[in-house]
Amino acid sequence: MNPDGHSDWFAILRNSNQGGYEVALTQPFTKQNLVIPVGTIPDGTNVPLPVAQEDGTDLMAFYGSSKGKTHLVFKDLSGGTISEVTIPNEGQITVGNYLPGPGEEVAVSSNGMFFIYNPISEKLVGLNGPKGIAQDSININTVG
């Protein structure tokens, strides 16, 4: 996770004493700590995914899948919900820079069908392609 736009921090998702969940962040070099209450999320067994914004800071993407659908909730680093979407696909989840526009997107791919969602522009694109996972020109970040 990159909360300051300059360096990566370690993140742990845990139950909150106030109910719901919280993300505990630690900067490995300065040892600075930050706790972000995020409340209710789709699935507390999935770690949050960092999704870069244009300024270099990350949004936190929380997800859960069932019955052929994937529910994504994007929160900022104060715990506020930025965007939410249900994608009609359940499969491999990747984060990358797939579409023109602000920041990164999340892709959900299964059996040659890719759905790509940008939480800032709230644009959802469905694509057909070869079986596999979505890959951008910079990196591959896979989960699930």
Image: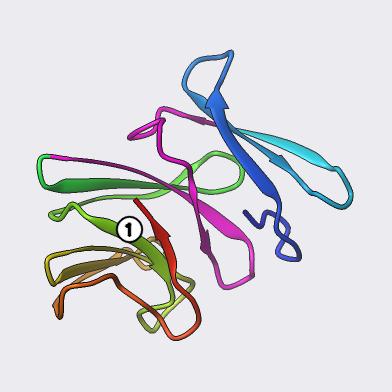
The amino acid marked with disc number 1 is Ile
Q: Is residue 17 above or below residue 13?
A: above
Instruction: Looking at the picture, tell me which residue is in the foreground, 46 or 106.
Output: 46
Left or right, 123 with reference to 113: right
Residue at 12% across / 66% down in the picture? 111
Q: Which residues are magenta?
A: 37-66
- Quarter-of-image position of residue 141: bottom left
Residue that lies at the very extreme toward the front in this rendered image: 132
Relative image position of residue 53 (x, y in whole percent)? 54, 67
Residue at 37% across / 68% down in the picture? 121
Relative image position of residue 130 (x, y in whole percent)? 15, 80
Q: Which residue is the site of mark 1?
A: 93
Instruction: Looking at the picture, tell me which residue is in the foreground, 93 or 83.
Output: 93
Relative image position of residue 86 (x, y in whole percent)? 21, 49
Q: Is residue 11 above or below residue 105?
A: above
Relative image position of residue 131 (x, y in whole percent)? 16, 73
Q: Secondary structure at mark 1?
A: strand
Residue at 55% across / 27% down in the picture? 14
Residue at 22% across / 55% down in the picture? 91
Q: Is residue 57 magenta?
A: yes
Left or right, 129 with reference to 20: left
